[in-house]
Image (spheres, helix red, strand yellow):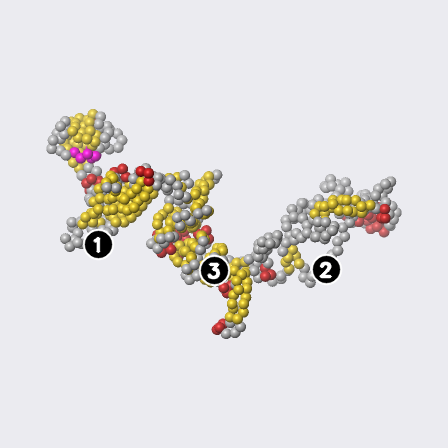
Amino acid sequence: MYWGFDWQSVAKWQQTNGIATDTQNILYNNPANTQMNVSGGSNRWHYQAVVDIVSTRKRTSEQIYYEIGVGGKTNTAFAAGSTAGDNHGVKFVTVGDSNYYLRPVACKTPVYSSGWNYDTPKEWEYKTLFLEDESVTDRIVSNSWNKGKAHVIYQKAKEVRRPYSVTWSDPYNVDVETLTLSSFNASQVNYANYAAKYGSLTYIDNYDENLLALQENKASLVPIEKAVLNQAAGGDGVVSLSSAVLNEGAINYYAGDWGCNLNPESVLIYDTQVFFADASRGKVIRITREGLSAISDKGLSRLLDSKFKNVVHSSTTKKVLSGFDPDDQYYYVTIKSDSATNTYTYDVRSGVWVSEASFIPDMYAHLDNEMYTFKYVSSGNKLVWRHSLTDRRNQFYGTNYDSKITVYSKFDPSMVKIYKAIGLNYQRINNSGSLPDIRLVSSEGNDTGDGVMAGSSLQEREGQWYREVPGDTSGSDAQHYFGIGNGVSASGTTLTMSNLRNARVPIGGKIYYMDGNDLEGAQASGPLVTVSSVDYSTNTITASGALNSAISNADIIIVTDESANGARIRGRYCKVTLDMSTVLPWELYSIDMNFENSRPNYALGQ
């Protein structure tokens, strides 16, 4: 209600001016009708009131309902002089989208001189007021329309979930101002169903002018807005031509029950190639114009199958990410589970899996022929890394990683071989950077150990980095113990012996002494000391560190290094691992192994 314009105010004005009598009984002699009791009032219709005459449109047989925008509640009505609002009536919450324009409008109004001439309309004048109006101008009726989609009541309607269906909007038209992509008109039956037996539909995208759809256990293509020929069963009858945005009868399912399961993040489309992972079947799939194939079967089937099983059985982390480096033509798949995270590299050009990568990203992207990865480290520390050719290798997100290469020497697998030497056809770019550490493990379990064949021990000979293969360090029988006599005295790093004329003291051997029946290290403190040099003329040994004075008059024992006296590395094959810690670029062309036939072996008829 609006004070001064409602029926009560008009009636009060009539009663006060003696114009009407019926309204007095209705309004003031009915105490029960408290809403009609007005303490005071005055008719304000003759005070330049603006009248908007609205005629009701004809209704259709069925009531049409329109979607609306965000609205708000209104306050209750108030009486004249109330502080609940102002004298313009009810307060309204502002709505962002309005159907009206606030514009100047020419309005005919009474004029006040000594009084209002509201009873002589011929003397009224035009006055410009700012009013809300549906039209932009009085010249053209242009009612604005801010209603949403139209709906009619459907008595049998119910909520339906279609996990294996797609729906589509109205087509986009570049020549029309209105954006129709948000309009989904169900009256046009704008949905199509895929085969429910293949599980829910988890990924769709455009592929080669078709719609690529990946269900949990199937991949398919379907043409969009293309005519489809329909013929009756058996090939007889009328042939009809139908056209739809998506025709269920035209869905082309790929052979093989492979889908992306519930890992749509594993799907990657680059040019005419599609990659995705089927974790439940332990496969990585590639789609080209020639068809669909499991690239995980190319030498990495067992490893990837075990990694995907970890994903399937994980309770929290179940992610499979795909990335593509356009410059190298490498496809990357990152597998994340509760137990492990790994990234593997597939060379698209050669069609083989080439390596395991050191980086574990949270997202991949490619732009301008370069690959980018994204890594969440901590709150406020989110990293983007560009994988382009730089002078630093195997460095990701500011962290340096070791580069490792593992190969197998398996020439003539029936022969038991003794491995004698190794050579690397290796080039350091700009002659900078260190050489890789090497470790050998034979089929018989012989192991040179970590750090024994350090890169610094390699020697360059005839353009190749070379060194002899040391002995087995995996067993205690690889050590030799030499008693070299009685120690007379120990001072600093010098050990004086009683007689060294008939002894052979190996350089690098560890120095021990006998304390009763126990073998103790000869060092004063810290790590074991070794033999640095021997002077047989003076019967003195120089140690690598300070000696314990307690070794005076004790029997001295020298223990040779395992690599020098351990069993030779022998077996039908040998696993060779190179570990490089530098981030500077280097190239490895080949690894050469020198071996001989084991004496007890007669594979060559010896």
Q: Which residue is pictured at 17% across the width and 37% down the height?
A: 481
Q: Residue furthest bottom?
A: 236
Using residue 209 as the reference point, say whether residue 430 is left or right of it: left
| Residue 281 lies in the magenta stretch | no
The type of residue carrying mark 3 is Leu
Q: Could you say where residue 440 lies in the image, as x and y percent from the top left?
A: 26, 45
**Residue 171, horizontal then vertical, whole percent:** 57, 57
Q: Residue at x 43, y 61 (%)?
A: 254
Q: Tell me the quarter of the picture where residue 260 sits.
A: bottom left
- Residue behind mark 2: 58
The local secondary structure at tag 1 comes to loop
Secondary structure mainly formed by the magenta segment? loop
Sequence order check, earlier mark of 2 and 3:
2
Looking at the rendering, the stretch of residues picked out in magenta corresponds to 505-512
Q: Earlier in the sequence, mark 3 or mark 1?
A: 3
Which circle marks residue 414 in the picture? 1
> Which x, y percent locates residue 541?
18, 29
Which numbered mark, 3 or 1, is in the foreground of this view?
Answer: 3
Q: Residue furthest left?
A: 502
Residue 355 locus on image (x, y percent): 35, 48
**Rounded to the nearest whole Å, what is the CA distance between mark 2 and mark 3?**
48 Å
Which residue position is annotated with label 3? 221
Q: Amino acid at mark 2?
A: Lys
- Please indicate whether residue 297 sits to the left or right of residue 17 in the image: left
Residue 516: numbered disc = none
Kindly check if marks 3 and 1 are in contact, taking CB atoms under 8 A apart as contact.
Answer: no
With 40 as the anchor, is 270 left or right in this view? left
Can residue 510 be found in the magenta stretch? Answer: yes
Is residue 204 something that shows in the picture? no
Instruction: Work out which residue is located at the far right of the displayed protein and give it.
Output: 18
Disc nearer the start of the sequence (2/1): 2
